C-alpha cells in the first residue's frame, strides 16, 4: 500500500514464474507435484526441519529438495518433468537465505549437463524478455541498475581452472606452480597456518582472502576433492565478479563453474574421461549462486556407495548429509535413462532480474523475528 516499487517487484515475480513455466512447457516438460513430507533426508546437503505425523506415529522431514522423487518419475517413463514448489532448510537467515523458499527443479532424459548449460542461457534470456514485455518501464529501470550482462555467452570454467586463475591473481610466490595450472594442494600441505601472514602480504588480492575461515574449512576436509572445493570457495568464488567481465569491462559476466570433484557431489554422474570429477555445474550471476545442475548418476551400485559415504559422514557428526535411500537405489536398479537435472531458486531469480538486494524483498511473507521478541 505504501510503496509502489514493492508492488512492482511482486508483479514481476509472478510474471517470471509464468515465463519459466512457458519455456519448460514449450519444451515438452510435464509439471508435477511431489511430496513435501519425507521419511528420509535426501536430494541435497542441508539441515532439515522435522515434524511428526500423529496417526502413524511417524517422524518426518520437511523436504529440502524434490530431486529423488522427480528422478523416480524418469524411471517410470516420464522423460521431461519439472516442479516449482516450496522447500525448507533449517539454516540461518541472510540476504540470500530464507528457511522456506521456492525451488524450480527439472529433469530431462537423454540430456547432459552440457545441454543444460545451453538451455539455461536460453531460458534466462527468454524469461527476461517476457519481463521486459510485461513491465517495460520497470524493466528498463531494473536493467539500468544491473551490474551484470545476460547478452553475451556466459563463461564456462572448470573448478580446478578457476582455482588456478585465483592462485595466479594472488601473486603468492609459493603458489607459482598452481598459477600455471598445477594443483594448489601440494603448496598448501596439511596445514598452511604458519604461512598465512607471509602470503597475505603478497598483494591486495591475497590480503582480501578470508584466511582464518579458509584454514578452518581446509582442516576439516577428508580428501583432496573436498580440499579443492574448499580452495574454490575461499580463493575463487568471492572474486568471480572481478575475474569475469563482460566485453564493456564494466559489468560482470555470468559464470558456469563446472566439473566438480565427485566427493562433493553425491548424486552426480562421474565424467567418463576423468572419473575423479563429475559432470556438474553451478551458475553464478554477479557472484551469487543461481542454479545447480548435473548429469545424473544412474548406476545403482555407485549411488549406493555414495549414500553409504554420506551416512559415514553423519556418524562422524556432519549435519548437512543425506540418508541412505534404499527405495531410490531400488528404483535405479529398475533402470533410469541417461539424464540431466537442474535446480534453481525462484526467489534468487526474482532478486536477480528486479535488482533486489535481499531475498526478503521478493518473498511476500519472509520469516522474521517477532517484534520485541528475544
Image (cartoon, helix red, strand yellow):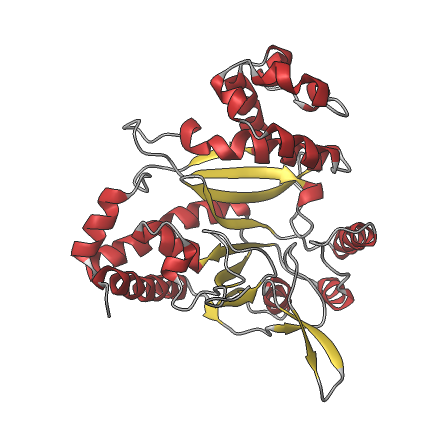
Coordinates of residue 175 in the picture (x, y in percent): 62, 15
Q: Is residue 23 left or right of residue 213?
A: left
Q: How many marks?
A: 0
Q: Is residue 45 left or right of residue 189?
A: left
Residue occupying the point 64% across, 67% down: 49
Q: Residue 24 sits in which quadrant?
A: bottom left
Q: Is residue 311 left or right of residue 168?
A: right
Q: Quadrant of the C terminus?
A: bottom right
Q: Residue 90 sits in which quadrant?
A: bottom right
Q: Quadrant of the N terminus?
A: bottom left
- Front residue of this view, candidates 270 and 17: 17
Coordinates of residue 33 in the picture (x, y in percent): 53, 74
Q: Answer whether residue 276 is visible to the viewer in this image.
A: no
Coordinates of residue 12 in the picture (x, y in percent): 29, 62
Q: Answer whether residue 337 is visible to the viewer in this image.
A: yes
Residue occupying the point 42% across, 49% down: 120
Coordinates of residue 207 in the picture (x, y in percent): 53, 21
In the image as oriented, which residue stretches furthest toward the left? 137
Residue occupying the point 72% across, 54% down: 319
Q: Residue 66 sits in which quadrant?
A: bottom right
In the image as oriented, which residue stretches furthest toward the bottom? 55
Q: Is residue 195 above or below residue 32?
A: above
Amino acid at each position: 500500500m505504501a510503496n509502489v516499487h514493492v508492488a512492482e517487484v511482486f508483479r514481476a515475480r509472478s510474471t517470471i514464474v509464468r515465463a519459466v513455466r512457458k519455456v519448460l512447457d514449450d519444451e515438452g516438460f510435464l509439471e508435477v507435484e511431489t511430496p513435501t513430507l519425507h521419511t528420509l533426508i535426501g536430494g541435497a546437503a542441508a539441515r532439515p526441519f522435522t515434524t511428526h505425523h500423529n496417526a502413524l506415529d511417524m517422524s518426518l522431514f520437511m523436504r529440502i529438495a524434490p530431486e529423488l522423487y522427480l528422478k523416480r518419475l524418469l524411471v517410470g517413463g516420464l522423460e521431461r518433468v519439472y516442479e516449482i514448489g516450496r522447500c525448507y532448510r533449517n539454516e540461518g537467515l541472510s540476504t540470500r537465505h530464507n528457511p522456506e523458499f521456492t525451488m524450480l527443479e527439472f529433469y530431462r532424459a537423454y540430456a547432459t549437463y552440457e545441454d543444460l548449460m545451453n538451455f539455461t542461457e536460453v531460458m534466462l534470456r527468454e524469461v527476461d524478455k517476457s519481463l521486459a514485455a510485461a513491465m517495460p518501464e520497470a524493466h528498463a529501470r531494473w536493467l539500468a541498475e544491473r551490474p551484470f550482462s545476460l547478452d553475451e555467452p556466459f563463461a564456462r570454467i572448470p573448478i580446478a581452472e578457476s582455482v588456478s586463475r585465483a592462485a595466479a591473481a594472488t601473486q603468492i610466490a609459493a603458489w607459482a606452480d598452481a598459477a600455471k595450472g598445477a594443483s594448489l594442494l601440494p603448496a598448501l600441505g596439511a596445514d598452511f597456518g604458519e604461512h598465512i601472514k607471509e602470503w597475505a602480504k603478497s598483494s591486495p588480492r591475497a590480503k582480501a582472502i578470508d584466511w582464518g575461515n579458509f584454514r578452518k574449512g581446509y582442516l576439516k576436509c577428508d580428501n583432496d576433492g573436498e580440499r579443492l572445493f574448499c580452495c574454490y570457495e575461499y580463493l575463487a568464488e568471492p572474486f568471480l565478479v572481478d575475474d569475469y567481465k563482460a566485453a564493456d569491462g564494466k559489468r560482470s559476466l555470468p559464470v558456469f563453474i563446472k566439473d566438480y570433484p565427485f566427493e562433493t557431489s553425491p548424486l552426480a554422474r562421474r565424467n567418463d574421461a576423468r572419473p575423479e570429477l563429475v559432470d556438474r555445474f553451478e551458475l553464478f550471476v554477479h557472484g551469487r549462486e543461481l542454479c545447480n545442475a548435473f548429469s545424473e548418476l544412474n548406476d545403482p551400485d555407485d549411488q549406493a556407495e555414495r549414500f553409504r559415504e554420506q551416512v559415514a559422514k553423519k556418524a562422524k557428526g556432519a549435519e548437512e548429509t543425506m540418508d541412505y535411500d534404499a527405495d531410490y537405489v531400488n528404483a535405479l536398479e529398475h533402470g533410469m535413462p541417461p539424464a540431466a537435472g537442474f535446480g534453481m531458486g525462484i526467489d534468487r531469480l526474482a532478486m536477480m532480474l528486479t535488482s533486489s538486494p535481499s531475498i526478503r524483498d521478493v518473498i511476500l511473507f519472509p520469516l522474521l523475528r517477532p517484534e520485541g521478541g528475544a
